[in-house]
Image (cartoon, grey):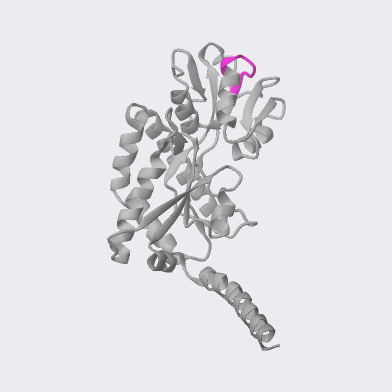
Amino acid sequence: MKKSVFYLSFVNLLLLFSWVLPSYTQEMSVLEKIDQTGLLEVGIREDAVPFGYRDINGNLEGLCLDLIALLREQLKQKLNKKVIALKLYKSTLYNRFELASDRIVDIECGPNTIREVPEYQIQFSQPFFLTGTQLLVKTEKAKRINPNRSLDNIDIGVLRNTTNEQLMAERYPLANLVQFQGVTGRSRGIQALQGNKIDAFASDGILLVGEAQIQNLRLGPDYTLVPTNPIDCEEYGLILPDNNPEWLSFVNSVIDDSSLQGIYRDWFGEISPQIESIQLFCGINQILEEGEESEETRE
């Protein structure tokens, strides 16, 4: 009798701890958790050249790895730690918000357009990259595929459930949108373009350039991005768990660090002029839009 009572009490105690401990972990801020565990947990894409991707040997590469390395070094200084371990998680188009919202990762790095995502408990960092939607087309078809027109009956590949797909559907209702999905969606879409199964593929310009390089496509002679200036402009932010103001402030300070510009130069090299041109265009547009919003506020 005593044994059974003791056993039930012990089980009840375990159940109590199993409920209390996760709750306590959830209540800790991200910085407190990293300080206590010495572990930084990060989500990285594997399908988004040049931010995160697998190279020909299957190794994870990308600008995001260098950005996280910079963040990790500054985190050591902030927390006064000699070592901070790094644990990487594979993020995708479909789980990236959930990883941060559920506190599985402390930060997710990829081509994430800053916007409202009310169904998840996340926040975005300040912008770390600026790009916009363009179409990759065969150079011989560039004159016929003019985004300033309706694109009537033009077959345009898009990644399903992206802001690019939404933009194409709203702006070009007479175009034929061909959906691709999954980790290899963008790669398969551009392969479909090569095989003349679609006329164009719509995505963020930087991602189109990256994928074209991976597939050894010659930009200029054989393939072209249209229009020269993007159809819209997108700000990329890092995804963080919500309600962590100190963590957000720290991540933003890393984005502001001048060392990040050197990382950009290392990654973009010869295509830097095109990227700078797009960022200048989008930057000017952003200033104009903010000015218009200020006028509306005054009225």
Q: Residue furthest bottom?
A: 2
Q: Is residue 142 visible to the viewer in this orientation of the structure? A: yes
Q: Which residue: 43% across, 41% down?
A: 283
Q: Position of residue 237 (x, y in %)?
A: 47, 49
Left/right of residue 134 with respect to residue 127 in the rendered view: right
Placement of 38 over or under 222, stated as above or below: below
Q: What is the tally of numbered marks visible in this picture? A: 0
Q: Nearer the viewer, residue 260 or 91?
A: 91
> Picture quarter containing residue 50?
top left
Residue 285 in the image: x percent, y percent?
48, 40
Task: Check the picture and name the quadrant holding the C terminus.
Answer: bottom right
Q: Is residue 147 visible?
A: no
Q: Is residue 206 above or below residue 145?
A: below
Magenta: main secondary structure: loop
- For the magenta stretch, what is the residue range? 194-200
Query: In this rendering, is residue 260 above or below 248?
Result: above
User: In front here: 103 or 193?
Assistant: 103
Q: Residue at x 53, y 73 (%)?
A: 24
In the image, is residue 295 part of the stretch drawn in magenta?
no
Front residue of 183 and 155? 183
Identify the residue at image location x=42%, y=69%: 32
Where 252 sits versus 164, above or below? Answer: below
Image point (70%, 20%), residue name: 153
- Locate residue 211, reporting x and y percent: 48, 27
Q: Quadrant of residue 155?
A: top right
